[in-house]
Image (cartoon, rainbow, N blue to C red):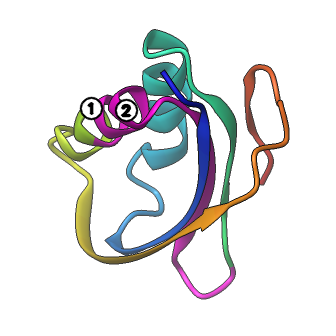
Amino acid sequence: MAIIRKHYIFYGSVQGVGFRYRAYYAAREYNVSGWVRNLYDGSVELEAEGTAEDIQAMLLAIRSSRWISIDNFLCEDIPVVGSHGFEITG
């Protein structure tokens, strides 16, 4: 299966609700690498690298949290960098 990398910005009730930690544990569960961080405008930025299926499963796990409410998000394909692991950077 092909490895891809995606860049996301999530809007809604995404800060102060465990989004970054949920993303971290979901990424580990589905073997997705990358990072996640809070932005100053109240949104959350995330980069995910893995198979399309694993990234989708990670996103579904994040959305399943009872406290996280994603109202909207932006997504773009970006070049694969060959990263390993997943970090909370901010």
Q: Is residue 20 left or right of residue 47?
A: left
Give the residue pinned by disc 2.
Answer: 58
Q: Secondary structure at mark 1?
A: helix
- Is 74 drawn above or below residue 46 in the view shown? below
The residue drawn where x is 40% and y is 63% is 14
Q: CA distance from mark 2 to mark 1?
A: 5 Å
Tell me whether circle 2 and circle 1 mark residues in contact (CB < 8 Å).
Answer: yes
**Mark 1 crowdedness (10 Å alpha carbons): few <14, some 14-19, many ≥20:** some
Estimate the x, y position of residue 51 in percent, counting from the top left: 48, 29
**Mark 2 crowdedness (10 Å alpha carbons): few <14, some 14-19, many ≥20:** many
Give the residue pinned by disc 1.
Answer: 61
The residue drawn where x is 52% and y is 76% is 43
As shown in the figure, which amino acid type bears the numbered disc 1?
Ala
- Is 85 drawn above or below residue 2 in the view shown? above
Q: Quadrant of residue 90?
A: bottom right
Q: Is residue 4 left or right of residue 75?
A: right
Estimate the x, y position of residue 73 in percent, counting from the top left: 37, 75
The residue drawn where x is 54% and y is 29% is 2
- Highlighted range, magenta: 40-59
Estimate the x, y position of residue 32 in percent, counting from the top left: 57, 25
Q: Secondary structure at mark 2?
A: helix
Q: Residue furthest bottom?
A: 41
Taking depth in this image into account, of 23 and 66 the one nearest to the observer is 23
Question: Would you say residue 87 sits in the magenta stretch?
Answer: no
Q: Is residue 20 left or right of residue 89?
A: left
How many numbered circles are shown? 2
As shown in the figure, which amino acid type bears the numbered disc 2?
Met
Question: Looking at the rendered structure, which numbered label has been put on residue 78?
Answer: none
Estimate the x, y position of residue 18 in percent, counting from the top left: 43, 43
The residue drawn where x is 14% and y is 42% is 66
Question: Would you say residue 54 sits in the magenta stretch?
Answer: yes
- Is 55 drawn above or below residue 11 in the view shown? above
